[in-house]
Amino acid sequence: MTIYVLQKLGYALLTLFGVVTIIFILFTILPGDPARMMLGQNETAEQLAVVKKKYGFDQPVSVQYIRYLNDLSPISFHSENPEDYTFLKEGKYTATKLFSIGNTTTVLKFPYLRESFQKNGKEVSEVIVETLPNTFVLAVSAIIIAMVIGVILGILSVLFKDGIIDKMIQLLSTLGMSIPSFFSAIIFAWIFGFLLHEYTNLNMTGSLYEVDDFGNGKYIQWKNLILPAVVLGIRPLAVVSQLMRNSLLEVLDQDYIRTAKAKGLSYYKIITRHALKNSLNPVVTAISGWFASMLAGAVFVEYIFGWNGLGKEIVNALNTLDLPVIMGAVLVIASLFILINIFVDIVYGWLDPKISRQ
C-alpha cells in the first residue's frame, strides 16, 4: 500500500510539473510583452525598463521559467544581491529563512503566485483566498443537488422502467448533458430571475455576500445560491441519474436479489434495503471526478450570475489581461483537480487492496 501511495504522489508531482510548464508557456511566452500589458498604452521606455527589471522580464525565457518554478516551490533560493530579482526584497511576503550560502538564501514559504497587474500590486494569493471559498460553496451545493435529485430520478427510472416517466427522465438527462452550462445559466436567470421574479423572489444576479444598504456591513444572501447551484448541477445530475439507473438495473439482475424476491420482499424493500447501497459505487466515483471539474466549470456560470468566485475572477482577468491572476487561478484549479483525484485513488486502493497491487 505504501508503494502504491508513493507512486500516486509521484504521478501527481509529474502532472503538476507539466501543468506549470504549460501555464508558463501559454501565459508568458505566447501573449507578448507582459510589461506593456501591465503599463497599458502610454508607457515610456524608462517605465518599461523599470517594470522589466523589477519582475525579471528582461531575462531570457529559460531564466524566467526557472524563477517561476522557484517562486512556486515551497523551498526556494533567493539572491541577496539587490540587483537580482526576488520578491523577498519588497518585504510584503513572509518566508522563513533556513540558511544562507554566500549571497544565496534558502527559505521555506507558501508558493508565491506573484502580483496582479491590475489590482495595484495585490498578491494573486490574496485574490484567490478571497474568491475560492465562494466557488467552493457553489460547487458543494451543486454536487449535493446533483447527488440527491440524480439518485431519486435514477430510482424512479427503474421503478417505471420503459414507461412514460422513465422515457421523460431519459430525455431530460440527455438534454442536461448536451446543453452548455452558460446557455442554461442565461435561460434560468431570464425565466426564474426575471419573468417569474414575482413568484420566486430570486435575482438574476447576486453573490453569496451582499452589502447592507444602511451601512451595517456584509450579510449572507442564501437565495442567490439557488440558481447558479442548480445550473452548475444540471450536467452532473444528468450523469448521476443515468449511472444510477444502469447500476441499479445491473444489481437487480444479481442472484441475491432473486433470492430476496423469492422470499416475498416487496420491490420497494428490495431496492431500499439491498440494491440501493450496492448501486451507489459508480455514482460516488463519478461525483468525486465531477466535483474537481466543477471548480473549472463554474467560470461562465459565476460570471453570468454575478457570483463573486474564482471563475468570475478568471473572466475579469482575461478581459484585462491580468496574466498573474489567470496563471495563479488556473494553477490552483489544476492542483485541486489533481489532489482530489489522487485522494480518491488512494481511498479506492485502501478499500480494495487488489487495486493497490495492480
Image: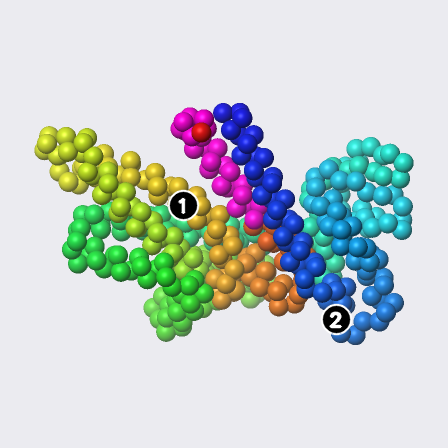
Q: Residue at x 51, y 38 (%)?
A: 342
Quarter of the image for residue 202 reads bottom left
Q: Please determine whether, in this image, residue 355 is positioned above or below residue 44.
A: above
Q: Residue at x 50, y 41 (%)?
A: 340
Q: Is there CB contact under 8 Å for labels 1 and 2? A: no
Picture mark count: 2
Main SS class of the magenta portion in the image: helix
Instruction: Decide if residue 273 is on the left or right side of residue 306.
Output: left
- Counting from the top left corner in percent of width and height, residue 157 is at 22, 51
Residue 207 visible, this angle: no
Q: Which residue is mark 2?
A: 40
What's under tag 2, amino acid-wise? Gly
- Counting from the top left corner in percent of width and height, residue 132 is at 57, 52
Q: CA distance from mark 1 to mark 2?
A: 44 Å
Q: Residue at x 37, y 74 (%)?
A: 195
Instruction: Decide if residue 352 is on the left or right side of residue 21.
Output: left
- Counting from the top left corner in percent of width and height, residue 267 is at 15, 40
Quarter of the image for residue 191 reads bottom left
Identify the element where label 1 is drawn: helix
Residue 108 visible, this angle: yes
Q: Please determine whether, in this image, residue 110 is positioned above or below residue 195.
A: above
Q: Which residue is mark 1?
A: 287
Looking at the image, is mark 1 or mark 2 earlier in the sequence?
Answer: 2
- Counting from the top left corner in percent of width and height, residue 165 is at 19, 56
Please state which of residues 227 and 241 is positioned toward the viewer in this rendering: 241
Is 169 covered by the magenta stretch?
no
Please state which of residues 59 and 313 is positioned toward the viewer in this rendering: 59
Q: Which residues are magenta?
A: 334-357
Identify the element where label 2 is drawn: loop
What's under tag 1, amino acid-wise? Ile
